[in-house]
Image (tube, helix red, strand yellow):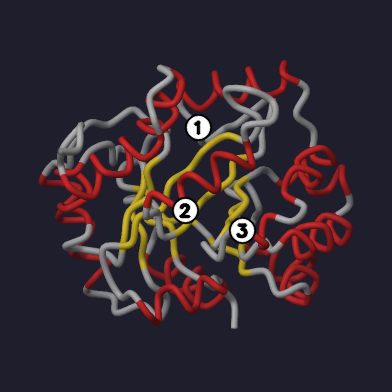
């Protein structure tokens, strides 16, 4: 069974997923970051593939992506860094990148390398549903990878149903029609949107991302979904040189330091 499926089967709520950019802040931090996140109690880890034109990402993640690329992070090197990661962690791992990266690398070769490293899912925000369904779905799923799609407050109900039928693992619920890191706190329009999605009784679990940055946000969105995804706040934390476990503790328990 895919580790994402196991996760949601064994832990139906309060799931914490943390996004980080591979190769940031230092080129060879990827492996260490994954291990430390898992040891700190993160339920799922989203590995960002540095890209020169990250359309869905805000300034913080864009900057981290630029740093990682300048550091020399490439897909072949990333796969080397992830080799053997499953000897030290069972936390579900999801790669988040862009379609051009897969196409340039070779979709089947990418999927094979991802499977070999123990990757469980892919988030490709700019992959059209039609292309996935008719060109890539069979290949991606033949390597045991779940493809996860995003919905926003502007996504029509019929498209949400279509995404639900094609997604595996979970649906990424974007909290606001904006880029990452641009929203602080959950406002009533977001809550209304979450409740509307809840009322659709979709088959896939839901994880809410974009604008989740602290314990209060995490607790709020977990009232409306199985979990939350945090990215920009974590990037800022590690960029400041602060301990990874301190960040995870603050999200889960609402304290910046531990007693």
Percent x, y for residue 202?
A: 36, 77
**Secondary structure beneath label 3:** loop
Residue under label 1, please give it: 57
Residue 108 sits above or below residue 215 on the image = below
Distance between the alpha carbons at the discs numbered 2 and 1: 24 Å
- Between discs 2 and 1, the one toward the N terminus: 2
- Which residue does the image show at 69% across and 30% down from the upper left? 28
Residue under label 3, please give it: 88
Of residue 155 and residue 120, the one placed in the foreground of this image is 120
- Between discs 2 and 3, the one toward the N terminus: 2
Instruction: Report the residue that reaches farthest toward the left.
Output: 188
Residue 173 sits above or below residue 235 on the image = below
- Which residue does the image show at 39% across and 61% down from the upper left? 156
In the figure, residue 112 lies in which quadrant? bottom right
**Secondary structure beneath label 1:** loop
- Which residue does the image show at 33% across and 62% down from the upper left? 15
Distance between the alpha carbons at the discs numbered 2 and 3: 9 Å
Percent x, y for residue 127?
A: 66, 52
Task: For marks 2 and 1, give the one nearer the viewer.
Answer: 2
Instruction: Kindly indicate whether the residue at mark 1 contacts the one at mark 2 (C-beta within 8 angstroms).
Output: no
- Which residue does the image show at 43% across and 46% down from the upper left? 18
Circle 1 crowding by C-alpha within 10 Å: few under 14, some 14–19, many from 20:
some
Q: Is residue 155 left or right of residue 162?
A: left
Q: Which mark is residue 38?
A: 2
Q: Is residue 184 left or right of residue 103?
A: left
């Amino acid at each position: 069974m895919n580790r994402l499926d196991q996760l949601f089967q064994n832990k139906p709520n309060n799931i914490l997923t943390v996004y980080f950019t591979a190769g940031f802040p230092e080129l060879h931090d990827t492996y260490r970051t994954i291990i430390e996140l898992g040891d700190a109690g993160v339920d799922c880890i989203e590995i960002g593939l540095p890209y020169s034109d990250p359309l869905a990402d805000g300034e913080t993640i864009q900057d981290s992506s630029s740093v990682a690329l300048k550091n020399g992070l490439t897909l072949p090197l990333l796969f080397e860094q992830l080799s053997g990661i499953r000897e030290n962690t069972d936390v579900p791992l999801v790669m988040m990148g862009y379609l051009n990266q897969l196409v340039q690398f070779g979709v089947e070769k990418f999927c094979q390398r991802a499977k070999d490293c123990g990757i469980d899912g892919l988030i490709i925000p700019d992959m059209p549903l039609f292309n996935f369904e008719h060109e890539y779905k069979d290949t991606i799923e033949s390597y045991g990878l779940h493809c996860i799609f995003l919905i926003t407050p502007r996504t029509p109900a019929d498209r949400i149903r279509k995404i639900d039928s094609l997604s595996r693992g979970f649906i990424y619920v974007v909290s606001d029609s904006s880029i990452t890191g641009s929203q602080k706190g959950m406002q009533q329009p977001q809550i209304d949107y979450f409740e509307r999605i809840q009322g659709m009784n979709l088959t896939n679990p839901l994880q809410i991302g974009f604008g989740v940055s602290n314990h209060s946000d995490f607790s709020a969105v977990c009232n409306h979904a199985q979990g939350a995804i945090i990215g920009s706040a974590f990037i800022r934390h590690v960029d400041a040189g602060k301990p990874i476990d301190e960040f995870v503790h603050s999200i889960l328990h609402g304290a910046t330091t531990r007693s």
